[in-house]
Image: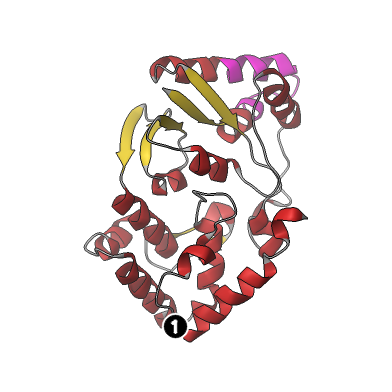
């Protein structure tokens, strides 16, 4: 089994858990302890660790994660990242978050290891090391999870959903729907009803986790029947992305 490990959720908590005068070795010990625990539980024969880099969402939409701009980062965070890169061969790539790399590398022969709720839109085997649970996500439940997130939003990433809709209500709205077109139509109609339709494409691009390199939500949207306003926004976003991956 090839374990795909969310390195962002290894480095940040390990660095943040250190007291002011703790040396880097404390964070290093906690990182290595967690990685070895994950590998042991999932019985991995191989592993890859992924870290976030500068990402395309911020380039397209400066408000993405803007609420984090003034937050002080843990003292040893960069050293933790460098240690995983040079000692554990952690992978990072320009324009991609760790989530995207996890989604791209996920196959029916891998185990995605993370406790990030957003990753439940990625089909395949999952291990949540916080809750210590295994789960298999199929294509249908994965796409449903994405549209539920479109309703809920993600305050930690500065993505505003629909006021008053949480996990329970989103599940009641999306779970009975069978096709992605139905899910799109339902969610977009609610955005329109709440007068936030101008944010739909931005939210979708920011929330969608890649499954293939350079294929974002706007590429997927071309297979849907779109209202004129959304189609125009999709085309404008595609135009903005023309040279993104080579800059």
State the SS at label 1. loop
Going by the image, does 79 lie left or right of 12? Answer: right
Which residue is located at x 36 percent, y 39 percent? 124
On the image, numbered disc 1 is attached to which residue?
A: 227
Viewer can see residue 64: yes
Horizontally, residue 91 falls left or right of residue 199, namely right
- Which residue is nearer to you in this view: 2 or 67? 2
x and y percentages locating residue 204 in the rendered image = 50, 64
- Residue 89 versus residue 130: which sits nearer the camera? 89
Q: How many numbered marks, from 0 up?
A: 1
In which image quadrant can residue 97 be found?
top right
Quadrant in the picture for the N terminus: top left
Q: Main secondary structure of the magenta part?
A: helix
Which residue is the extreme one toward the bottom? Answer: 228
**Residues in magenta, as a range:** 14-32
Q: Name the residue at 74% across, 51% down.
A: 70
The answer to whether residue 196 is visible is: no
Q: Residue 43: where, in percent of width, then height?
A: 40, 16
Q: Residue furthest right?
A: 247
Q: Position of residue 24 (x, y in %)?
A: 73, 18
Residue 23 inside the magenta-drawn segment: yes
Residue 118 position (above or below residue 63): above
Which quarter of the image is occupied by the C terminus? bottom right
Vertical position of residue 9 compared to residue 238: above or below:
above
Q: Quadrant of residue 8?
A: top right
- Give the image quarter of residue 22: top right
């Amino acid at each position: 089994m090839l374990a795909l490990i969310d390195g962002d959720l290894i480095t940040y908590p390990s660095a943040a858990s250190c007291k002011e005068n703790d040396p880097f070795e404390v964070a290093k010990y906690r990182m290595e302890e967690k990685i070895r625990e994950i590998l042991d539980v999932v019985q991995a024969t191989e592993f890859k660790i992924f870290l976030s880099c500068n990402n395309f969402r911020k380039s397209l939409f400066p408000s993405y994660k803007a609420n984090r701009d003034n937050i002080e980062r843990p003292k040893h965070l960069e050293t933790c990242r460098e240690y995983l890169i040079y000692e554990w061969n952690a992978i990072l790539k320009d324009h991609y978050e760790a989530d995207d790399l996890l989604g791209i590398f996920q196959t029916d022969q891998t185990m995605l290891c993370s406790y990030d709720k957003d990753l439940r839109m990625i089909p395949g085997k999952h291990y949540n090391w916080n809750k210590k649970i295994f789960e298999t996500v199929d294509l249908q439940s994965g796409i449903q999870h994405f549209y539920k997130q479109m309703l809920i939003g993600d305050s930690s990433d500065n993505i505003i959903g629909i006021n008053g809709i949480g996990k329970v209500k989103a599940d009641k709205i999306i779970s009975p729907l069978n096709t992605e077109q139905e899910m799109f139509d339902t969610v977009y109609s609610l955005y329109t009803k709440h007068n936030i339709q101008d944010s739909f494409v931005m939210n979708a691009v920011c929330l969608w986790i890649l499954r293939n390199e350079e294929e974002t939500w706007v590429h997927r949207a071309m297979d849907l029947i779109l209202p004129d306003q959304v189609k125009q926004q999709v085309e404008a976003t595609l135009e903005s992305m023309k040279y993104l991956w080579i800059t």
